[in-house]
Amino acid sequence: MYKDAWAVIIEARHILLVSHVNPDGDTLGSVLALYDILKKMNKKVSLYNRTKEMPRIYNFLPNIQKIRDKLPKFYDVVVSCDCGSFDRLGLAKGEYKLINIDHHASNQMFGDINIVDAKSASAGMVVYDFLVQNGIAISKVCATCLYVTIVEDTGFFSYSHLEEKTFRTVANLVRYGADPKEIAELLKSRVSLAKIRLLGYVLNNFELYFDAKVALISIDKEILIETGAKRYDTKNIVNVLRDIITLKVSVMILEEKHGGFKVSLRSKSDLDISVVSKHFKGGGHINSAGFEVKNCDLLGLKNRILDILKGIV
Ligand SMILES: [Mn+2]
């Protein structure tokens, strides 16, 4: 599988690296790690993401400014990273070979070649294995990008997938030049004022259910305008509620600009929250999952989520 995929990449005339819509550090770090390696091999490579605005927090990732929201005229190989389903690519089907690199257990295996390892902490860890298996040397840029994918998806080493292999990979990435302190500072200590204001709103307005085992916050469009927060500022804001001692699950319902809702779910220990997102055709992991819904009202959605949670908390 690793070798087959590599052979496809070597023979490609123009490789398109695709990260998922509303990108996070895992998907971006993964494609940018590959970009660095393939560029240095003098391959023709482009970066595509359908989302117009990249989250500012990742602006330190090398070559992130080269990501375009428009497709090149020609490409014969697409590599997607961290996308559990084809629609997350924001791409039409076409005459290209698709290599699907991911770590979601729910991955729909939509590629011509699927390199999916649900045991990996991040898609970037799968990219790392892919490169190492093919005898590729990891550059400092590549190591930095891949390190970001792991701290991103493990919440700086506090969620699931913290096996020995995760730390061995991280140790190797540090050896290849990733700087843990610098990356931590870049990711954690540059919070926008708008996000802090949004956090204030969340802390003042969340609701508790089932003996304070579930916390829920809904954020409507107006709140984002009031606080000046962007959609990506809502990311992981639900984590702060999960940290309350009595909590088992925290939920954020975000009203989308053009209708519909995005729901983020977080849980503690072995409570598998992806069970809930599956009800709504979403994806995710044991402690972190999410889904998007169109055509429903907030109250109805809230009640449906609480109904499912009632049976598992
Ligand atoms: Mn991921």
Image (cartoon, rainbow, N blue to C red):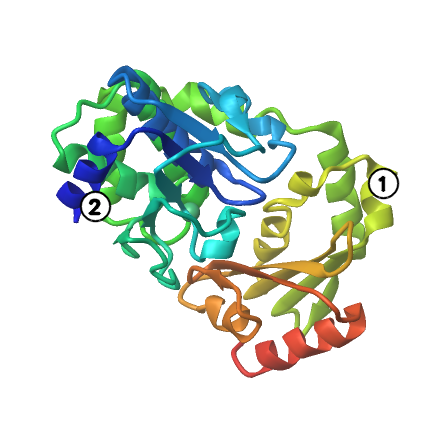
Task: Please name the residue shown 61% across and 39% down the image.
Answer: 51
Nearer-the-camera pick, 101 or 119: 101
State the SS at label 1.
helix
| Residue type highlighted by circle 1 | Ile
Q: Mark 1 vs ligand 1: CB under 8 Å?
A: no
Query: Quadrant where the C terminus lies?
Result: bottom right
| Residue type highlighted by circle 2 | Glu
Specify few, some or many for label 2: CA neighbours under 10 Å numbering under 14, 14-19, or 20 or more: few
Q: Is residue 202 left or right of residue 148?
A: right
Q: Quadrant of residue 229?
A: top right
Residue identifier under label 2: 164
Q: Position of residue 298 (x, y in %)?
A: 78, 68
Task: Please name the residue shown 52% across and 34% down the image.
Answer: 71
Nearer-the-camera pick, 91 or 190: 91
Q: Mark 2 vs ligand 1: CB under 8 Å?
A: no
Taking 123 as reference, is 295 above or below it? Answer: below
- Distance, label 1 to label 2, CA atoms, is 44 Å
Q: Position of residue 108 (x, y in %)?
A: 38, 63
Q: Is residue 11 left or right of residue 88?
A: left
Residue identifier under label 1: 225
